[in-house]
Image: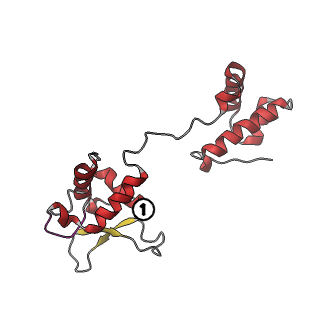
Amino acid sequence: MYVYVSKHRRDFDFLEKRRMKAIALLGQGLSQSEVARRLGVCSQTVSRWNRMLSATGVSALRKAGRAGRKPKLAASARKRLEKLLLRGPEMLGYKTPRWTCQRVAHLLRQEFNVDYHTGHVWKILVGMGWSCRRERDKTPARRWRKAPPSAGNKDKPKAHDASCSPSAAAE
């Protein structure tokens, strides 16, 4: 028996294979409800796949490609951003050597002509391996820095930390 769980929700290759498996099982003469049971989906889903197959053929069940909007920053631009971040915020005229989300958003606007909301800058930085750290001198200010390669998941923020947002970080 096949059991598929929702952890594959964004795995487009897996989802396409599951639809193709449904076609094969339907082709073997199994009922839609039996196919649904074996694949761990509801029978309405198998019915929809069968209608799409009848109307437009197998191409209707192929994966559609990447989901969502294309990123504003290409991989090459992210590499360049990394180099600029390592040079420090003083290059933009800031007095302190701390990157805040607001400062990174300013850098993105200045160097790449791209506007990101400061709340999304957090996601970009975490995706690039940067982390938000509290200063050791017990001040409330936090700063972004490149996480060491061996840091692992324990230092990775679980959710957006308001203290690293532009409103909480003093300029």
Q: Residues within 10 Å of mark 1 (few under 14, many from 20)?
A: few
Residue 65 falls left or right of residue 87: right
Q: Quadrant of the C terminus?
A: bottom left
> Which stretch is magenta?
94-99
Give whichever of 40, 122 is nearer the camera: 122
Q: Position of residue 94 (x, y in %)?
A: 15, 64
Residue shown at 33% from the left, 50% from the top:
120
Q: Does residue 95 show up magenta in the picture? A: yes
Residue 88 falls left or right of residue 58: left
Q: Quadrant of residue 17?
A: top right
Residue shown at 31% from the left, 71% from the top:
133
Residue shown at 43% from the left, 39% from the top:
69
Q: Which residue is mark 1?
A: 158
Residue 48 falls left or right of residue 35: left
Q: Quadrant of residue 146?
A: bottom left
Q: Position of residue 169 (x, y in %)?
A: 20, 62
Give whichever of 128, 171 is nearer the camera: 128
Q: Position of residue 98 (x, y in %)?
A: 22, 68
Answer yes or no: is residue 87 visible.
Answer: yes
Residue 53 falls left or right of residue 83: right
